[in-house]
Image (spheres, grey):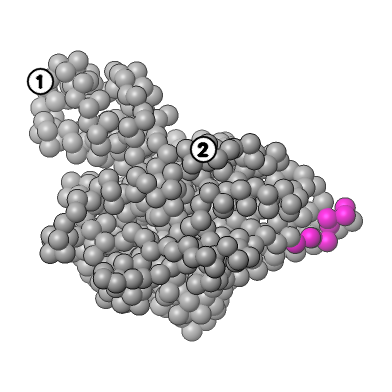
Amino acid sequence: MNGYDCFMQSMDWELRREGFPGFLAQIVLELEGRLSEDALRASVDRIVGHFPVLRSRRRRALPYFYPYWSFDPDSFATPYPRIRTHVLSDAKGDGEGEATDVERSRLHLEIFNVPLDAKGGELLRFDLISRFDRTDLVMTWHHPLMDSQGAEKLLALVARPELEGPEIWREGENFANSYTQRLLVKKTFKERMAESRGSLENVSACSRPAPVSLYAGRRASAGRRQGFHVVRFSPEETRAIAANASALCGALRTSDYFLWATLVELDRLQRRMDVATPSYVITLPVDMRPKGGRGALFSTQESTLFYHIDAETLADRDKVLESLRAQTTQAIRKDWLRSFLYGMEISRPFPAWFFMMMSRNAMKGEIGSLFFANIARNSANLTEFLGSRILDFSHVPAVAAPPGIGVFFYRFGDALKCTIVYVEGMLSEEDAEMFAEGLKSLLLRPDQAEGPDRADSC
Amino acid sequence: MPEPAELEAELIAWLAREIFDSSIELSPQTDLLAAGFDSMSLVRLLVFIEEKYGTQVAEDEVTEEVLRDVRSLAPFLAELIGSGS
């Protein structure tokens, strides 16, 4: 496991400590027609046979105590990955539309909150939800195993039953070409400490003044489950948003535009919830794979940028966008992406609780205000799964608490999508919907946010 | 001011080394965006230009048209470098 995997593992530990199911992530497909469990099982077994890591357990060993995935002889006997089929009441064509939608949403939420037995070797799980003329496929994975791009690639392998052995290997590079081999020169501990200093100092600087997350402010009402809300944009809305982003932020800078809108809406939400904060810190994962290639499938191949915005600044859109741009440029100029990875690598021998303690200390008790990602395009370009047309595609990753809220943008075909994940109880469904509608409205009409009224607290 | 052809070669070498996978055969006509060039790639490119030539290029001056391929990008950057922006 590389350093970033260890960071993800520490977030899994933190979530379990807080009573949540753990740090898992999902891709949800809506498929045309019915997909049989047998067909899925055959394809999954074929892929798992090539990648034994999918049934492995995490171990540590002397002399350095670095964690690694271990496939033991026992691993053959595990029942993992499990495939479960759920049949909705309209599966025989006699259900009522609205009731079925409610039933389907509830089931998705339940599945999202079922933990994986990662210690026992369960790193992957599939759920099929059979409806009258559709099937929902939910792939859930232990997030420390792979990032969202890796998961999309794995799902793409399962989706294609025609792939043979060498093709599977060719399409799905395993741990080769990992960022540790490409980007980090082997150095002594002292040298790695020196390399990591820049980004870690930036993380500390971001916490001055320290942000107060929604989770910290609403901890008493926060439950131990996570909910999610998916926002769908039509192709026309997607084009309009892309044009707005280009006009305000320049070519390609959609992340800045999404970040700005997310910050404004988060500020509105926190003020509605009476959770005052002097500043916001948002993390942005950056894929470190070389562009255009396959890249490593397993093992997180990301680094992280940290953005700090004073709450008072949010009233001025141009100032926020300029600040985001300046912070990105500074991070690249000072090579903080690579510096951060050195920091992660230093932490590998430490247990998860220690790693998380260090992270919380650096951020004065918080980990950030909100998790954010702009996954951009569906990297695997999935349009069919085992012969069934894919009608919809969603990313649903759990978020660490604190901060207990995450906003993830991605694309399916020519449509932009956004998943908002939140701790139940900390926010109600209505709060999450209001946040989502506000975000959508702002992205489409950025001029309506001429300064959030900071005097107007609910 | 670097000649566009010279800058073109320099850009291709840099892109091959810093941005793209070795499986991508870069040419002056390679569609950069289709090959995966993204916003972070753009920031890295502009930092490279600034460090190499001492020229700051404002991001909002770089359009998708300019980023179509290296053949479009090189003369655009060469002109800015030459004017000492």
Res. A282 mark = none
Most foreground residue, A323 or A394? A394
Q: CA distance from mark 1 to mark 2?
A: 50 Å
Q: Quadrant of residue A355?
A: bottom left
In the image, is residue A88 part of the stretch drawn in magenta?
A: yes
Q: Nearer the viewer, mark 1 or mark 2?
A: 2
**Residue on which disc 1 sits:** B1
What residue is shown at x 46% (from left), y 74% (from top)?
A: A15
Using the image, name the chain to which the residue with label 1 belongs.
Answer: B
- Across and down, in percent, residue A97 comes to 81, 55
Marks 2 and 1: in contact by CB < 8 Å?
no
In the picture, measured across the screen, residue A417 lies left or right of residue A330, that is right
Magenta part mainly helix, strand or loop?
loop
Res. A166 mark = 2
Quadrant in which the N terminus of chain A is drawn: bottom left
Most foreground residue, B64 or A392? A392
Amino acid under label 2?
A: Pro
Please tell me whether residue A26 is drawn above or below residue A287 in the rendered image: below
Name the element at disc 2.
Answer: helix
Residue extending farthest to the front is A73
Using the image, name the chain to which the residue with label 2 belongs.
Answer: A
